[in-house]
Amino acid sequence: MNRSWLFIAALTLPLLVSLAGCGDDSTVIDAGMDGGDAALDADAGPVIPDGAELCETDADCDDGILCTNDGCLEIGICRHTADNAVCANDVFCDGVEICDARAGGCVMGDPNACNDDDVCTLDRCDEASKTCQQVPRDFDGDGAVDWHCDGGTDCDDRNPNLSPLTNEICADGVDNDCDEVIDEADCGRSPHDTCDDPFDVSAGGRFFVDNEGAMTDYGLSCAGMRTDVVLTLTTTEAHDVTISADGAGVTAVSLRTTCTDMATEVECESGFPGEARIRSLPAGSYFVIVSDSGRGEIEIEVDLVPPTPAPTNETCSAPEDLTGGGAVSGSFLDVDDDYTMRCGFSGQADLVYSFTTTEIQDVRVTLVGSSGDTMNFAVQSVCGDDASTLRCARGTPAGSVVHELPAGTYYLLIEGPSYREVDFTLDVEILPPTAAPVGDSCDTAVPLTVGTTELGTLADKEDDIEISCGFFYRDAVHSFEITERRDVTLTVDGGGTFMYTSVRTTCDDDTTQLRCSSGNPSRVRLRDLAPGTYYVIVESFRGTGYNITVETSAPTMVTPVTGNEDCGTAQVVPETGGLFTGTSLGAVNDYETSLCGASARAPDVAFELTLTTTKRVIANTDGSSFDTVLHVHEPVCASMTERYCDDDGGDGSTSLIDETLTPGTWFFVVDGFGTSAGGDYTFEVQVLDP
């Protein structure tokens, strides 16, 4: 069609409409076409809808949507027709797909729920047959219909072990067969409950047994008498054997040659899971008793592999040489505990390696257990002599670097967990010598400036020093000096990490330790400390950074106190703070707590502090002879109304409250844990600017 004709038609059409609207309002406009007007209407041409796409060919109408058929009509405008067939994916159960140009193409339909609105049917869409299927409700899949439905006989449709198709099990206190009678006379044992009906696992692999309804029949040396099931294992040649059992509770595995005789046990292990491992088990027939402290399904794994020889490096008489470094794999299977190391425990199997260096070197050791268990190792200059230990490391995995190790022969003792015989990978690297980080040992202790907060880190440190309140963690060493007698407060803040802090007069001598404290943060308070140099050992289970602060003040004079048995006779604390001693013996239980629960029902004594301005108040019971609870009341003293309460926030079992308090009268109650804890106490109040 000629575009100029369309343009003229578009201009004349409004004029014609306007003329038709002139004249008498009562004139009826004929909706049809009179014969005399036919020629005029034909000349006017077709009406073009508002917003229509003008076109000359079909190609002008391509909208880029795959599921529409696009074409140019004779009147010169585009038409887009949705074709749902293009969107169909031939999948019945995901609903009917449609073409929606506004959404840009094909749109997924609603999945076919096949819901018949009947609660007694289970509805599903079957793609194979492309039909909806409704079957009688059997939610637990045990073959019996829920008895709330017509014809239903299943008394518990959530438990597949209870149905009319199940045999009644003796002595389990459950109606297994849904006949409304429990443990009737014709009941029977659960499968594989006795030596007469063992479950055969000789082929190896993964199996599932159930001890629901099983009885307690056979004792295990590693677990005593518990509900048990019986397996049988027959081999025609020697194997290394691993039998693992994972049940609802603590699971134990006993391998024996005579089913009913515990004295014939070859191996017995319990745990989460229970796992028995035997090296080079001779060919033969064996029984496996599996017991569990819980009830339900037990997953059994039986692994049979060719036999392996026992390690030859169990003792210092024949260590395996790792000179030059290298990685080795091994197993603690059937290995004894021959040696003691300071970071280990008794009953841990150990193996011995050695290496020789001809010059000063760094040595990095990494020990990884196969099951994610904690491992430990010791580097010694004299094999088996714990006093010659240069480094003892424990972890998951265990790893450490010994810096600048002099030339010589060294021994590496490794240990696995005491409760499981695990496999391991040991990696020894001989590296160029590097200096240990500053603060990693007593020789490079980092000096602290009194009155300032300084940064420290455990990220690059090793475990070199033992402290009484810590564990086998990496540690950092600091020192500080005072020139006159002072009260000292040391705070170590790991930013949310639990920290351990030891203060001593001789760095590498734990007998000189003055105080060891743990917490988040860790706080050590030392009163009337003599002039001298002191060492601070900081530990944590995480290689974290921390802030460490040493603050000192003039020694506080001790005020003995008596007669402060309640808030009415409370000992007054000066607004500058103070240090008090006394005894709670002879006092009574006046006040109990809500914030500390029922932990404070012992004899208590009271103190009163009046503040005229807002202050930071640190109150503690460090030095008390019993397990204390400290609670704070304001404005009156009454049970269960305390503002603050602490049980063991101080050193050991003592209490600590550190709060900003507003002007007013505050009562501090020194209480005992439980109902009877009491004795000599020390109570200190520090009043500081907020």
Image (cartoon, helix red, strand yellow):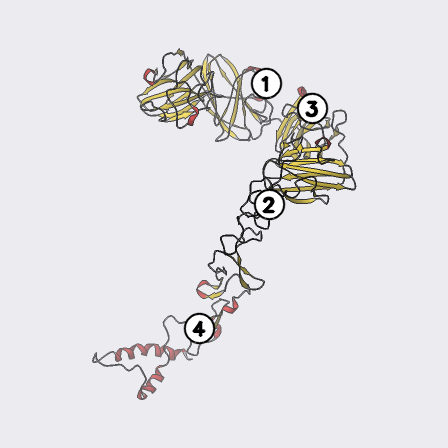
Q: Which residue is drawn at 33% across and 86% down?
A: 38
Q: Is residue 427 visible?
A: no
Image marks 1 and 2: residues in contact by CB distance under 8 Å: no
Q: Which of 358 and 612 is in front in this view?
A: 612
User: Residue most toward the bottom?
Assistant: 36
Q: Which residue is drawn at 47% across and 75% down?
A: 57
Residue 506: x percent and y percent?
A: 56, 16
Tell me the amino acid under the disc marked 3.
Tyr
Q: Earlier in the sequence, mark 1 or mark 3?
A: 3
Residue 117: x percent and y percent?
A: 46, 59
Q: Name the residue under label 4.
A: 79
Q: Which of marks 3 and 4 is nearer the N terminus?
A: 4
Q: Name the residue under label 2.
A: 168
Q: Which of 644 and 573 is in front in this view?
A: 644
Image marks 1 and 4: residues in contact by CB distance under 8 Å: no
Q: Which of 578 and 325 is in front in this view?
A: 578
Q: From the viewer's perspective, is the residue at label 3 or at label 4 nearer? A: 3
Q: Which of 53 and 555 is in front in this view?
A: 555
